[in-house]
């Protein structure tokens, strides 16, 4: 199926990072604002894994929190199966909420240490009224624990009795307990050992096939994204700079920033291809560069790049926001 489940249109989020009013008056300072997400648009089709990648500070986790409603957008729309999430009332949002869940980055912080595992997993079931009888939700918890590779007996334990990988399995079981269609995965393996990462990623792919799930997968690790994603969006300083099919992006990246990210991935196949080292760092988002925000780090930048901000446009099968690509200089 290729119909759209989630549609993001001109999504923006601006944070007020000003000092307190009295400090600003005494120090003669103006208000300061940080644009974490800047007019981002993309679609996620049913049954696919759409990945967002970029360096730390590019706005990936902010977009994740905006989509699931943990923070409110400053502008734009978040449409889930035709409903604008940002404008829903509490009653209608409650009905929508069970259809999308989130797996957080840190399994050590996302589980309540005072609750037993069975209560953690059962919380969405009871909150959304999916199974009213105690026997029913207990059976459902046992099934979920078995589904994610744990034992039904583990429900009586506390989170501190498990390893990092096991805790993330518990977090996945909690997300599945609401019977969602869409799951936002915010760097779900970054806090885990490499060997455990592979187990969790394989589990997530198996669950996607079994339950027909749709994923938004957020990561800074391109080797993980290559294993998981069917389509990839590349973020830089809160803006999308490239969107492409997964295989296309790794085979033929267009944007200079995407090429720089791929050059930072170890060449395990030892192809001997020429690689450009990563240069510079993300600018201060409170005072971003004029024009294209990537131009201070780009070898292809010209005067136009320094004065105009490129929009995301389609070039063959890849969407890019780059004047060098548009003019054939890339």
Image: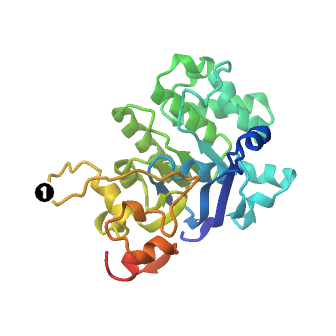
Q: Quadrant of the C terminus?
A: bottom left
**Depth check: 207 or 71 in front?**
71
| Side of 101 where 2 appears, left or right | left
Residue drawn at 62 percent across, 41 percent down: 175
Which residue is at the front of the view, 112 or 240?
Answer: 240
- Residue 116, by quadrant, is top right
Of residue 299 and residue 117, the one placed in the foreground of this image is 299
Using the rendered image of the protein, determine whether residue 318 is visible from the camera's viewpoint: no
Q: Position of residue 138 (x, y in %)?
A: 69, 28
Task: Give left or right: position of 124 versus 277.
Answer: right
In the rendered structure, the answer to whether residue 241 lies left or right of residue 21 reads left
| Quadrant in which the N terminus appears | bottom right
Near mark 1 (Cα within 10 A), the count class, few <14, some 14-19 or many ≥20, is: few
Q: Dot 1: what SS?
A: loop
Badge 1 is on which residue?
A: 272
Q: In the picture provided, is 297 more to the left or to the right than 64? A: left
Q: Residue at x 59, y 71 (%)?
A: 3
Number of numbered discs overlaid on the protein picture? 1
Measuring from the top left, give residue 301's x and y in whole percent: 37, 71
Whether residue 303 is situated above or below residue 48 in the rendered picture: below
Q: Position of residue 137 (x, y in %)?
A: 71, 32
Q: Residue at x 53, y 33 (%)?
A: 106
Q: Is residue 97 visible?
A: yes
Which of these two is toward me, 308 or 232? 308
Q: Position of residue 83 (x, y in %)?
A: 75, 64
The chosen color scheme is rainbow
As drawn, 149 above or below 230: above
């Amino acid at each position: 199926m290729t119909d759209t489940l989630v549609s993001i249109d001109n999504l923006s989020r601006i944070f007020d990072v000003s000092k307190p009013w009295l400090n600003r008056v005494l120090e003669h300072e103006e208000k300061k604002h940080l644009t974490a997400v800047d007019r981002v648009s993309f679609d996620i089709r049913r049954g696919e894994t759409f990945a967002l990648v970029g360096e730390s500070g590019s706005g990936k986790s902010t977009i994740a929190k905006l989509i699931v409603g943990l923070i409110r957008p400053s502008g734009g729309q978040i449409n889930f199966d035709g409903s604008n999430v940002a404008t829903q009332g509490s009653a209608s949002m409650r009905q929508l909420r069970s259809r999308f869940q989130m797996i957080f980055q840190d399994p050590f912080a996302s589980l309540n240490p005072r609750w037993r595992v069975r209560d953690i997993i059962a919380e969405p079931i009871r909150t959304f009224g999916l199974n009213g009888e105690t026997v029913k939700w207990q059976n459902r918890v046992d099934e979920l624990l078995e589904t994610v590779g744990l034992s039904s007996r583990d429900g009586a334990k506390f989170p501190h009795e498990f390893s990092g990988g096991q805790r993330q399995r518990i977090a996945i079981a909690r997300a599945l307990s609401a019977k969602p269609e869409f799951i936002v995965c915010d760097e779900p393996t970054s806090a885990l050992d490499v060997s455990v990462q592979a187990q969790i990623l394989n589990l997530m792919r198996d669950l996607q096939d079994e339950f027909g799930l749709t994923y938004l997968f957020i990561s800074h690790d391109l080797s993980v994204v290559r294993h998981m994603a069917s389509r990839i969006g590349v973020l830089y300083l809160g803006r999308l700079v490239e969107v492409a099919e997964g295989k296309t992006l790794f085979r033929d990246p267009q944007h200079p920033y995407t090429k720089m990210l791929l050059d930072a991935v170890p060449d395990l196949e030892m192809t001997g291809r020429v690689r450009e080292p990563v240069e510079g760092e993300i600018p201060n988002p409170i005072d971003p560069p004029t024009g294209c925000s990537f131009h201070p780090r780009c070898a292809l930048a010209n005067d136009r790049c320094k004065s105009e901000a490129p929009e995301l446009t389609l070039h063959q099968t890849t969407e890019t926001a780059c004047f060098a690509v548009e003019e054939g200089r890339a």
